[in-house]
Amino acid sequence: MGKFFNKTAGRIIDPRTFWAGAGAGGIATIATYPADVITTMKQTGKDPKKELEEYKTPQAKLKRLYSGVGLKLVKNVPQTAIVLGTNALLIKALAKKKIPI
């Protein structure tokens, strides 16, 4: 597969940029997902402490906090890869045109 060539910018894009974005998106989603779940509980009028008390083991509580994370990963991983890849491409294109960032 190697490298992608973009005729518009006339630059070579390193695919590692996209993979780094995908990894960053996945890590960020996994790290922040429980906070999103707790925020959603509060916004819907539920008390997070009471909601989690019904789960007896720490594993059960984590399972509750991470339920649905798969769908969020399916959205966030490609999105972050595209954003960071496009960002790298635009920075290179602007540098070639000597446009200050």
Image (cartoon, helix red, strand yellow):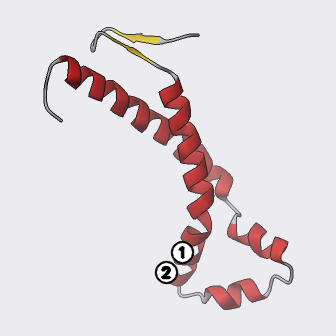
Q: Secondary structure at mark 2?
A: helix
- In the rendered image, is residue 75 in sight? no
- In the rendered image, is residue 77 in sight? yes
41 left or right, relative to 65: left
User: How far apart, in angstroms, are the residues tagged by discs 1 and 2?
Assistant: 5 Å
Answer above or below: position of 38 versus 5: below
Name the outermost residue toward the left: 99
Quadrant assignment, res 37: bottom right
Question: Where in the figure is residue 78, as x and y percent of width and height?
Answer: 53, 37
Question: Where in the figure is residue 51, as x and y percent of width and height?
Answer: 69, 85
Question: Where in the figure is residue 66, as x and y percent of width and height?
Answer: 70, 64
Q: What is the quadrant of the N terminus in the image?
A: top right
At x 81%, y 82%, the residue is: 55
The label shown at residue 40 is 1
Answer above or below: position of 42 versus 2: below
Q: Secondary structure at mark 1?
A: helix
Give the amino acid at mark 2.
Gln
The label shown at residue 43 is 2
At x 86%, y 84%, the residue is: 56
36 left or right, relative to 55: left
Question: Where in the figure is residue 58, as x and y percent of width and height?
Answer: 82, 76
The reply to whether dot 1 and dot 2 touch (C-beta < 8 Å) is yes
